[in-house]
Image (spheres, rainbow, N blue to C red):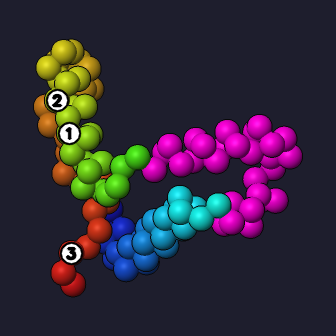
Amino acid sequence: MDWARANRPAIDGFLAADAAAARRLAGDAAEWQAIRPLMNAPDPALYAELRSRFLAGLAHPSADEEQRTAERVFAILKATGGTKATAGLTDLPPGVFWLPATGA
């Protein structure tokens, strides 16, 4: 975690670039044609399935939403299976999710 804190600008930059690339792929079919040769999917059905699964994986719009979803899932696990289902945890530990820097 110390390394991550010391390199926060690089990590935030990488995550921002990743999110921008995902937005481009989600919104522009021509972008898929540009990366298709890199996908190792010569079969059109496989290509379509890979593209479909990637786009389906973009369901969470933000790190905050992913955090809220994880907290809801954790609460359900804890309520139904107790700490046995949560590996002894009573709460999600702080810092489990990398949230974008705010302000600075």
Q: Which residue is mark 3?
A: 102
Disc ID at residue 75: 2
Q: Left or right: 28 with respect to 81?
A: right
Q: Does the segment drawn in magenta span residue 48? A: yes
Q: What's the CA distance linking mark 1 and mark 3?
A: 21 Å
Q: What's the CA distance linking mark 1 and mark 2?
A: 6 Å
Disc ID at residue 71: 1
Relative image position of residue 45 (x, y in whole percent): 77, 37
Crowd class of label 1 (few under 14; some 14 to 19; many from 20; radius 10 Å): some
Residue 91 vertical position relative to residue 58 in the rendered view, above or below: above
Relative image position of residue 11 (x, y in whole percent): 42, 71
Name which of mark 2 and mark 3 comes first in the sequence: 2
Q: Does the segment drawn in magenta span residue 46? A: yes
Q: Secondary structure at mark 3?
A: loop
Which residue occupies 26% across, 40% down? Answer: 70
Disc ID at residue 81: none
Which amino acid, by three-letter code, is at mark 3?
Thr
Q: Left or right: 9 with respect to 92?
A: right
The mark total stands at 3
**Residue farthest along the right direction in this orientation:** 42
Residue 20 vertical position relative to residue 71 in the rendered view, above or below: below
Crowd class of label 3 (few under 14; some 14 to 19; many from 20; radius 10 Å): few
**Residue farthest along the top direction in this orientation:** 81
Residues in magenta? 30-58
Relative image position of residue 33 (x, y in whole percent): 74, 62
Quadrant assignment, res 72: top left
Which of 99 and 52 lies nearest the eye of the viewer?
52
Does the rendering let one see residue 78? yes
**Residue farthest along the bottom direction in this orientation:** 104
Q: In the picture, which quadrant includes the N terminus? A: bottom left
